[in-house]
Image (spheres, grey):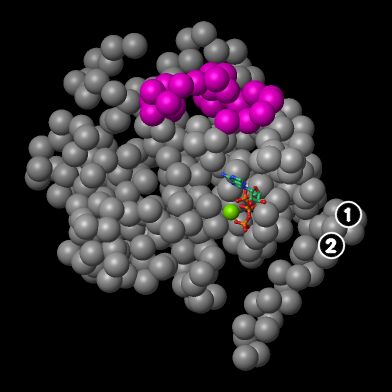
């Protein structure tokens, strides 16, 4: 477990400020974590697993025997109509909600019955970018991005260097001294992604990263996430009903409808599915951007 390099005690491992602010291409897992000594090949390949998950609220069943896996380093896109349980799925993965039955595995560990204290450790390696951004409103953008870095023992000069790097990567370096309330939704989201990266997580979950902004900003945010996917190569789950974004990002697709999940191993398989429900879903999404253009 002990690393020959001098690392902070937790799993946070700073990257050299002169390098890319994101991990090298051939390192799908964060250094210093998951030595994997006791894991077999298949569990090591799987980062997230939902196994027969059921979840309801009051009398209403939301997820019904939902199972899927996300392989290490891959991007899974979760799609489906409003209210089908996409955000609930992410909240279960983050430990904010408990399933009624079934099991959740993260990085080879069964986290289903983890306590809040145990989940806090999981959240060091799995971070979520919320729909709202969930930034600290009273802190500047610079302070927001610096926040995860300050949890380590890094010296202030290095923190500044990293903040600038992450801000440049997400193209928010021109707003570093502003407060979140002064920014547009799209910029706040980019700042939230920069802050998530500053945590140097092994996996990032995005909830609807391109909603509530105009099509140009949505496309811009989608391209930033795509760039991160290509250079960062961390495991990601992107919840969206934006098929254009999904097509760009997806290695696998989980389509939720009426409590059930259908898993597709490629965009082609999703696009060619003859399921009438899916056909309607795709048609609806094709119409919306067309309307935007003509208005
Ligand atoms: N904490 C909660 N208490 C009660 N019901 C909840 C709770 N969280 C979610 N739900 C319900 O579960 C269902 C699924 O919610 P969820 O937020 O996952 O939908 P979604 O697929 O993310 O939708 P959207 O695309 O609109 O974000 C909804 O009917 C919602 O009202
Ligand atoms: Mg949602």
Given residues 292 and 59, the one toward you in this image is 59
Q: Are marks 2 and 1 in contact (CB under 8 Å)?
A: yes
> Quarter of the image holding residue 202?
top left
Query: Label 1, on which residue?
Result: 275
Residue located at (22% from left, 35% from top): 151
Residue located at (24% from left, 20% from top): 9
Give the quarter the ligand 2 occupies.
bottom right
Query: Label 2, on which residue?
Result: 279
List the single residue furthest toward the top. 38
What secondary structure is marked by label 1?
Answer: loop
> Quarter of the image holding residue 52?
top right
Whether residue 181 is visible to the viewer of this picture, yes or no, is: yes
Q: Position of residue 77 (x, y in %)?
A: 63, 49
Q: Is residue 82 left or right of residue 159?
A: right
Residue located at (32% from left, 49% from top): 195
- Which quadrant does the N terminus fall into? top left
Region of the chain picked out in magenta, as a range: 98-122
What secondary structure is marked by label 2?
Answer: helix
- Which quadrant does the C terminus fall into? bottom right
Q: Position of residue 280 (x, y in %)?
A: 83, 65
Q: Is mark 1 within 8 Å of ligand 1?
A: no
């Amino acid at each position: 477990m002990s690393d020959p390099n001098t690392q902070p005690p937790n799993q946070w491992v700073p990257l050299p400020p002169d390098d890319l602010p994101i991990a090298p291409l051939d390192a799908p897992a964060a250094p210093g974590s998951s030595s994997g000594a006791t894991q077999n090949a298949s569990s090591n390949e799987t980062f997230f697993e939902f196994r027969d998950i059921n979840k309801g609220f009051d009398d209403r069943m939301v997820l019904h025997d939902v199972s899927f896996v996300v392989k290490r380093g891959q991007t899974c896109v979760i799609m489906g109509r409003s209210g089908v349980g996409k955000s609930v799925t992410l909240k279960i993965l983050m430990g904010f909600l408990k399933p009624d039955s079934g099991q959740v595995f993260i990085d080879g560990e069964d986290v289903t019955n983890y306590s809040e204290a145990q989940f806090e450790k999981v959240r060091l390696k799995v971070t979520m970018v919320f729909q709202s951004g969930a930034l600290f409103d009273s802190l500047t953008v610079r302070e927001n991005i610096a926040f995860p870095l300050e949890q380590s023992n890094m010296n202030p000069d290095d923190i500044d260097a990293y903040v600038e790097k992450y801000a440049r990567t997400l193209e928010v370096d021109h707003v570093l001294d502003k407060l979140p309330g002064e920014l547009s939704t799209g910029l706040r989201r980019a700042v939230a992604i920069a802050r998530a990266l500053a945590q140097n997580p092994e996996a990032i979950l995005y909830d609807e990263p391109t909603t509530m902004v105009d099509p140009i900003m949505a496309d811009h945010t989608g391209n930033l996430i795509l760039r991160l996917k290509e250079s960062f190569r961390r495991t990601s789950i992107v919840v969206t009903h934006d098929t254009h974004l999904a097509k760009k990002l997806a290695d696998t697709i989980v389509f939720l409808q009426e409590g059930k999940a259908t898993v597709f191993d490629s965009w082609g398989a999703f696009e060619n599915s003859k399921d009438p429900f899916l056909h309607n879903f795709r048609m609806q999404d094709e119409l919306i951007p067309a309307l935007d253009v003509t208005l």
